[in-house]
Image: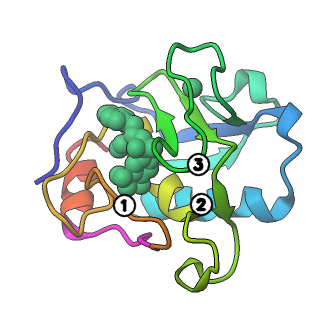
Amino acid sequence: HYTFFEGKPRWPEGTQELTYGFLPDNQLTDQVKSVFATAFDRWAEVTTLTFSEASSYYTADIRIGFYTGDHGDGEPFDGVLGTLAHAFSPTNGRFHLDGDEEWVVSGDVTQSELSSAVDLESVAVHEIGHLLGLGHSSDLDAIMYPTISSRTRKVELNNDDISGIQELY
Ligand code: TQI
Ligand code: ZN
Ligand code: ZN
């Protein structure tokens, strides 16, 4: 079953459009950016929210960046596997990914020759759930279940994720 953060924080009543931006230093390719766009769309489909890329990273509601090791927010990344990414509850908007992972952006992660390959879209869908206000779910098939194996793809919201997010938006 789904959970919320303490105090059930959410983006303000009446929020329709949320914007996201990419840390300019990362110089992400359009292909990587489109993985995030697809992940946001999965949540937009089941809520009244829409997501679009901001013209400026600095004014975006949700700020996405890849970082390695200690990156100044007290929650250092740890190299390959372990912590893959973190995001914070509404309305913080910080969405950080561990730049040391073997991110799979396109193609089939389950067929990767790298045992540590991690599917970017799977992690993005999960972290966006946190950014919108969902905590972890006890339902094994939920996107918000707290563990995922490497070389696994899980991107479809299940009924538990949908019920949870629809209680907020
Ligand atoms: N990152 C943790 C996570 O997103 C960070 C975290 C731990 C967290 N507890 C939290 C974030 C409570 C918000 C609220 O769960 S992770 C998965 C999963 C991680 C884990 O790197 O361990 C995914 C990132 F759930 F699948 F294991 C993405 Cl998909
Ligand atoms: Zn961080
Ligand atoms: Zn999580």
At mark 2, the secondary structure is helix
Is there a contact, CB below 8 Å, between mark 3 and mark 2?
A: no
- Per the image, is 145 magenta? no
Q: Which residue is mark 3?
A: 80
* Mark earlier in primary sequence (3, 2): 3
On the image, the x and y values in percent for residue 4 come to 21, 36
Dot 2: few (<14), some (14–19), or many (≥20) neighbours within 10 Å? many
Q: Which residue is mark 2?
A: 120
> Residue at coordinates 21% horizontally, 27% vertically from top-left?
8
Mark 3 vs mark 1, CA separation in Å: 14 Å
Mark 3 residue type: Val
Q: Which residues are magenta?
A: 153-159
Q: Mark 3 vs mark 2: give the one in front.
A: 3
Q: Mark 3 vs mark 1: give the one in front.
A: 3
On the image, the x and y values in percent for residue 95 come to 56, 35
| Relative height, residue 20 to residue 74 (above, below) | below
> Residue at coordinates 63% horizontally, 13% vertically from top-left?
72
Residue 47 in view, yes or no: no
Which quadrant of the view contains residue 59?
top right
Q: Does residue 113 appear left or right of residue 29 in this picture? A: left
Which quadrant of the view contains residue 161?
bottom left
* Mark 1 CB lies closer than 8 A to ligand 1: yes
Dot 1: few (<14), some (14–19), or many (≥20) neighbours within 10 Å? some
- Give the overall secondary structure of the magenta segment: loop
What quarter of the picture does the C terminus occupy?
A: top left
Q: Which mark is residue 116?
A: none
* Mark 2 CB lies closer than 8 A to ligand 1: no
Mark 3 vs mark 2, CA separation in Å: 14 Å
Residue nearer the viewer, 86 or 69: 69
Mark 2 residue type: Leu
